[in-house]
Image (spheres, helix red, strand yellow):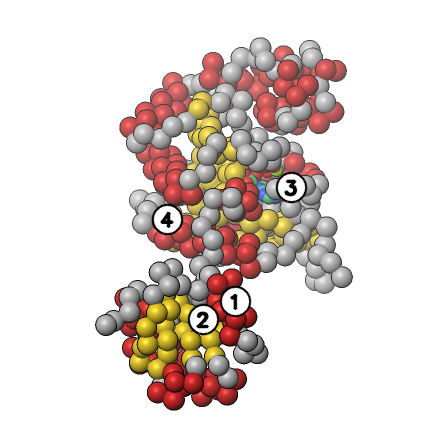
Amino acid sequence: MKTVKGTRDLLPEDTYLFQQIEQRAWDHFAKYGFREIRTPIFEETSLFLRGIGDDTDIVTKEMYRFKDKGERDITLRPELTASVCRAVIQHNLVGAEDILRLMYSGPMFRYERPQAGRYRQFYQFGVEVFGSQDPLVDVETIEALMSFIAPFKLPNLELMLNSVGDETDRPAYLKYLRQTLNSKRELLCSDCQNRIDNNVLRVLDCKQSNCQSHLQDLQPISDFWSKENRDHFESVCSGLKRLDIPFKINPRLVRGLDYYTKTAFELVSGDLGAQSAVMGGGRYDRLIETLGGKDMPAFGWALGLDRLASLWSTYADPEPGPDLFLIFGQRQWLDTALPWIASLRRAGVSVAYDIRVRSFKSQMKRANRENASWAGIIGEDEHDQQTVALKNMQSSEQKSCKRSDVAATIKNKEIPC
Ligand code: ATP
Ligand code: MG
C-alpha cells in the first residue's frame, strides 16, 4: 500500500521543519494580536462556490467534492479564507468598531497535477484581518509577514505588489482587456481563450510564455485606477518604504476574483522553479458581504508551508540531538538507573540510550551519531557509587558527577568542580 497520488507522508525530518515554522509563526503573530481559529476540514460545497468563485481554477478543476452518506454536497477545504469568513459571520465575531485578527494553520486539498512543490494535500499558514479599510492594515500585515520570514534567511525572495482596483474602476479595465484580447484570441492558449469570456483578469498571470509574449503591450491596470484606489496603493507603498521593506510593483499580478479589492501581493522565490509563489494575499473588501454578512472590509494572506519548508531545508540548523546519551557497562545497570532517568526527564532533560546495551564503542558511536550534547558513562565504579562520568561532547571535558547533580549540570552547561 502506498500514499494516494499527490499526497505524501511528512516524516520526522519534515515535521521537524514544519513544527519549527509553525511554532515561530504562532509566537510571532501573537505579538500582533492574531489569535488562532480552527475550522472544519470540510464544508458545504456552496461555501466555496460562493466564496472562491465559479470561474476560478480551484472551483472548476481542483475541488475534492463528494456526497456524504446523508446526500450532503461536501468539499474538502481548498483554502481557508472562505471558511474563516463563514465563521466570522456565523459567530458574529466582529463588533461595530473592532478589528479582528485571526490566524490558522492546517492541510488544504486541491485536485491538481502533482509535481515538485504541488500536492493534492498541502499545508498553509495564514492570517486574516477583518474590519478596517485603512491602508495601515495592509502595511502592518505585510510587515508582520516580512519580519516573520526574515530570520529564515532565504535568498532570492521577492515581494510583488499591485492593486486590482475595485468595482469603481476595475469594470472599465476588464472591458478594455476583453476588447483588446478578443482581437488576439487565436494567439492565446485555450485556457486563456476561456478566461477572456469568464475571468479575463486571470489572462494576465497565465504561466505560458507564448501567452505572456502577446500581453507585453497591454496597458497596466494602474492606468485605470480611481483616485481613491491610487491613494490607497500609494499609502501602502510609502508605508512599506518607511519600514524599509523592499518590494517590486508588478502590474501583471492579479487575484482573479471579483471580491478582491485594491492590494494584491505575492512572495516569489527564484529557487522554487515553476512553482515560484511561496504565499499570496490581498484585500478582499467584498467577500463577507458576498457570503451573506454585513459590509466588512478584510485583508489576508496564506503561506505555503510545503514550499517554505523545502526552501528552508537547505539553510535550517540540524535538528538538535538529546541533551544526554547514557552509556552502560551492563544491561542490568540500565534497569536500576530507570527511576533516575525518569527524574531527569521530569526535570526537563532529554535522555536517550541504547536499549540493547551493545559494546561501549557502539554506544559511544551512537551518542555521536545522535548529536547528543553530553554522554553519561556508567561503568562499574559509577554504578557502585551512584555517579556518572559526564562528558561534554563538544569540549570532550569529562568529570565524575553525582547523579542528583546531573540535571543542573546539563542546564548550566558546565561541569561543577
Ligand atoms: P499557484 O499559482 O502556485 O497555483 P495559488 O495562486 O493557487 O498558487 P494560493 O491559493 O494563493 O495559491 O495559495 C497560497 C500559497 O499556497 C501558494 O503561494 C503556495 O505556496 C501554496 N499552494 C497553493 N497550492 C498548492 C499546492 N497544490 N501544493 C503546495 N502548495 C500550494
Ligand atoms: Mg493554484
Mark 4 vs ligand 1: CB under 8 Å?
Answer: no
Residue 231 occupies which quadrant of the picture? top left
Can residue 165 be seen at all in this image of the molecule?
no
**Mark 4 residue type:** Phe
Q: Residue 57 or 134: which is nearer the viewer?
A: 57
The residue at which mark 2 appears reads as 325
Query: Circle 4 — which element?
Result: helix
Q: Label 3 neighbourhood size at 10 Å, few (<14), some (14-19), many (20+)?
A: few
Q: Position of residue 342 (x, y in %)?
A: 41, 80
Quadrant field for ligand 2: top right
Q: Which residue is mark 4?
A: 29
Tell me which label, 4 or 3, sits earlier in the chain: 4
- Left or right relative to 216: residue 367: left
What residue is at 32 percent from the left and 26 percent from the top?
A: 241
Quadrant housing residue 151? top left
Instruction: Give the mark nearer the N terminus: 3 vs 1.
Output: 3
1 or 4: mark nearer the eye: 1
Residue position marked by numbered label 1 in the rendering: 366
Give yes or no for contact between labels 1 and 2 (Cβ–Cβ under 8 Å).
yes
Mark 4 or 2: in front is 2
* Disc 1 within 8 angstroms of ligand 1 (CB): no
